Image: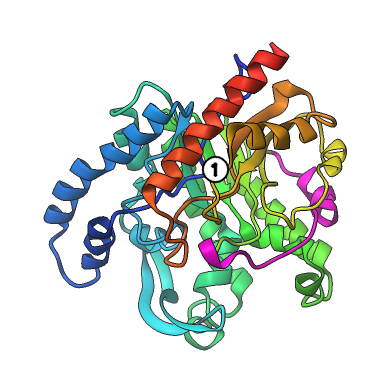
Amino acid sequence: MDNYLFPTTVIGSMPRPKYIKDLVESQSTGQSTQDFHRIIEKAVPYIIQMQDFAGIDILSDGEWRRKSYIGIIADICSGFDLNIRDVDGERQTWHTVTSKTKVHNPGQFAREAAFLKSHTNRQIKVALPSPYLIGERMWDRNQSSSAYPTKRDFIESLIPILRAELIALRDEGATIAQFDDPHLCLFVDPKVRAQFEDPDSEAAYIVDALNRITDGIDGIKLALHLCRRNKGRLGWVGEGGYAPILSVLNDLQFDIIMFEFAIPVAGDKRVLIDLSERFKIGLGCVDCRNSHIDTPEEIAARVRQALKYVAPERIILHPDCGFAPGSAADIPIDEAYQKLKNEVLAAEILRSEYR
């Protein structure tokens, strides 16, 4: 990644065929764990090889094993119940913390990395949910307060758990550990900021929690992915440029910050001037929500706009978000393949211009 210009990667999740969706769902309805692993370990190499054949430099396993990119914490720890509650104004089946968490299945992310390494010679990445993201989605005032009186109590309890998972992931040899935190990115939106007495302090807490997870851990690149929530064809949640959170981002002790810029509400790339030069910049330059397939030249043009403000050595190309972060993001797998292929072609165009 450090040896050539414009490396390409994905965010994490990749579209799943219906049988994979049914297979993952079957874990909630009693199918044997042995059957699940037997089938999924034959299926996941397909999505790895799809990225490889598209030419992507840094691969994920597509997160096909996960019921959700957040809910994986309930596979690592006990203390969660699967129930129906209001999420984003809809009644959804969701994991909620209801008792003190206890780690009973450690090393989940490391096992994903080990499998991924065994099926590619390319660099690899694994995404972890941030503690604040988990707290926002899995703590409920009515159902969780007997175990954790406040949401922040729950978030604090997750920091040592995620730190141990990160160390195991590092020891397995992953290139990048990426923490996903769309809620930090939502602090760009005036409507979200208005919900907090001190939104800057809340955003600073998110960064501080991440820094405490990763403090002193070397031997792995650390990335933060920001997005305005991905609802697939239904769009996004937050709107606004990155200026309101740049100050706290500069306090982040990570190597890479991954922004979305293909989305039309992401604001001006000029703000990247104010980001510390110690960061590499993941540039979301491929639309992962709409059916339009960006051409290589459209993707390259987005990157050229950023190059007015950022040195080419600092830029990594990727889609705005995952292609399947939740049930609403139902993107065809062939569409994702073509978008990734065009991302790679765009990188080749840019290398020819800047080598």
Specify whether 294 is left or right of 146: right
**Above or below, comparing residue 142 to residue 256 in the picture:** below
- Identify the residue at horizontal 80%, vertical 29% (top origin): 310
- Identify the residue at horizontal 62%, vertical 45% (top origin): 224
| Element type at mark 1 | strand
Is 113 contained in the magenta span? Answer: no
Counting other residues with Cα less than 10 Å from the Cα at mark 1, is it few (<14), some (14-19), or many (20 or more)? many
Q: Which residues are magenta?
A: 232-253
Quadrant, the C terminus? top right
Amino acid carrying label 1: it is Gln
- Identify the residue at horizontal 82%, vertical 62% (top origin): 200
Q: Residue 29 at x, y = what percent?
A: 20, 73
* Residue 102 appears in the figure: yes
Q: Residue 274 at x, y = what percent?
A: 87, 40
**Above or below, comparing residue 202 to residue 51 in the picture:** below
Q: Toward which corner of the image does residue 196 lie, by quadrant?
A: bottom right
Specify whether 210 is left or right of 75: right
User: Mark 1 — residue?
Assistant: 178
| Residue in front for this viewpoint, 202 or 119 | 119
- Identify the residue at horizontal 60%, vertical 25% (top origin): 347
Residue farthest top in this picture = 355
